[in-house]
Image (cartoon, grey):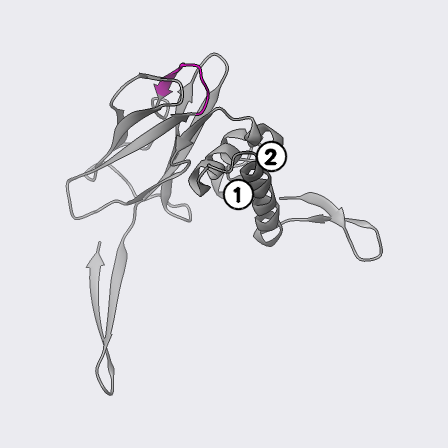
Amino acid sequence: VGLSALAPGGSLTTVTGTSFAAPLTAGAAALVKELHPAWSPEMLKSALMASARDLGGDFWSQGKGRLDAFKASERKVLILPPTLSLGMDDLTTLDWVRSDTLTLVNTSGVSVSYQVEGPPSGSLPAGISISLSSASITVPPYGQGKVAFQTIVDNSLAKIPSAAPPAVTGLIRCLSATDTLSVPFALLLGSYIDLEVTTTRYLPIMAWFANT
């Protein structure tokens, strides 16, 4: 996270890593929870992620950015789930399709409307597409609205990314005149081996299944 912190002796040092980020995030979540005791852990996560300041890094290195607990406490509309793991493409099928749904939760007494956008045209690799059920949504006061979408992979065209992890990432965004909600997603493409271990009285027996 690259934040300044006190070091032994009273000097300042720069601290980074998940061991430092985790307690800061837990503390921020506790502050928001105190103001919104009815919010679920997923709602708290959504508020923190939607209010974070983008530092310009990729999702694997910065997540959604730097926490802002005060802005998180002021969130009126939340999107659930706040992140999406689309799982792993099944390379044994010609066309792999997965369906998911995003839920917008309006905690205010005013109706809100959003335009819904998938990844920009050309931003996803060949053979991979996101199909939204609707280009807009209106969420009533103290109500919910849902946006369904499908992830479609044409395995005759899609290539396994050379990066580690071998994943395709992007954002699904909901935009209004005064607010932007974005949900990052990741889809893994690659060969893998499933291992199943069972035991007898004396020796383990291992079976494996390959997807290539």
Residue at the image position 35 percent from the left and 20 percent from the top: 116
* Residue 128 at x, y percent in the picture: 27, 33
The one nearer the camera, 187 or 179, is 179
Q: Earlier in the sequence, mark 2 or mark 1?
A: 1
Instruction: Classify residue 98 as left or right of residue 103.
Output: left
Tag 1: residue type?
Answer: Ser
Few, some or many residues within 10 Å of mark 1 (<14, 14–19, 20+): few
Quadrant of the image occupied by residue 132: top left
Q: Seen from this angle, which residue lies furthest bottom?
A: 202
Tell me: residue 170, above or below residue 18: above
Tell me: residue 28, above or below residue 78: below
* Residue 72 at x, y percent in the picture: 55, 31
User: In the rendered image, which quarter contains the N terminus?
Assistant: top right
User: In the rendered image, which quarter contains the C terminus?
Assistant: bottom left
Tag 2: residue type?
Answer: Ala
* Residue 170 at x, y percent in the picture: 39, 32
- Tell me, yes or no, whether the highlighted magenta stretch contains residue 115: yes
User: For numbered disc 2, what is the local secondary structure?
Assistant: helix
Residue at the image position 57 percent from the left and 44 percent from the top: 25
Residue 130 shows in the view: no
Q: Comparing marks 2 and 1, which lies closer to the viewer?
A: 2
- Tell me, yes or no, whether the highlighted magenta stretch contains residue 80: no
Q: Which residues are magenta?
A: 107-116
* Residue 102 at x, y percent in the picture: 33, 31
Q: Which residue corresponds to mark 1?
A: 61
Residue 162 shows in the view: yes
Residue at the image position 42 percent from the left and 49 percent from the top: 164
The one nearer the camera, 151 or 74, is 74
Between the C-alphas of marks 2 and 1, the distance is 20 Å
Tell me: residue 164, above or below residue 76: below
Q: Which residue corresponds to mark 2?
A: 69
